[in-house]
Amino acid sequence: MPNTGVPSDYVPSDDEEFMNERQREYFRKKLQDWKESILADSKDTLSHLQTETASLPDVADRASAETDKSIELRARDRQRKLISKIESALRRIDDGSYGYCDETGEPISLGRLMARPVATLSLEAQERHERSERIHRDD
């Protein structure tokens, strides 16, 4: 990553131009750090799964271990999907579309991006999308 001179204590602000170079580099680093953290956790989970299922003599212990394994595998699947979203966000940073709503093209608030760096919809568009899903789900 090029050194853009973004200080480690830098936090994007509404007082500056939206998605300027400093903001893009801030979010790139945030996303890359998040991805590395998920991958490290994933490796720990995998090694835990491989060692934990050693021969457990008690049927209840084996059943409990299988339940734990199932929960961990579902969590890993969610992590895999999240990594895909992170990689997509990194590509959007590269192509200049990061931070803009997929539906309206308007900027996504910095607060929303800070809380959910993989967001592709503004808060308003996300709320509309969720209302629409609830309506269709209830049909």
Image (cartoon, grey):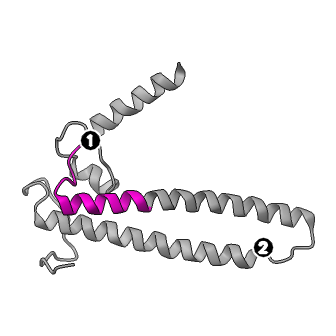
At horizontal 85% and vertical 66% (from top left) the residue drawn is 62
State whether residue 9 is above or below residue 106.
below
| 85 falls in the magenta region | yes
Q: Is residue 90 left or right of residue 82?
A: left
Q: Quadrant of the N terminus?
A: bottom left
* Closest to the observer, 83 or 128: 83
CA gap between label 1 and label 2 equals: 44 Å
Q: Is residue 43 left or right of residue 105?
A: right
Q: Residue 119: x and y, percent? A: 32, 50
Q: Residue furthest top?
A: 139
At horizontal 40% and vertical 27% (from top left) the residue drawn is 131
| 118 falls in the magenta region | no
Q: Amino acid at mark 2?
A: Thr
What residue did someone put label 2 on?
53
Label 2: state its secondary structure: loop
Q: Residue 55: x and y, percent? A: 86, 76
- Residue 122, which numbered label? 1
At horizontal 78% and vertical 73% (from top left) the residue drawn is 53
- State which mark lies toward you, 1 or 2: 2
- Residue 135, which numbered label? none
The residue range painted magenta reads 83-102
State whether residue 90 is above or below residue 47.
above
Q: Residue 112: x and y, percent? A: 29, 49
Q: Residue 108: x and y, percent? A: 22, 46
Q: Amino acid at mark 1?
A: Ser
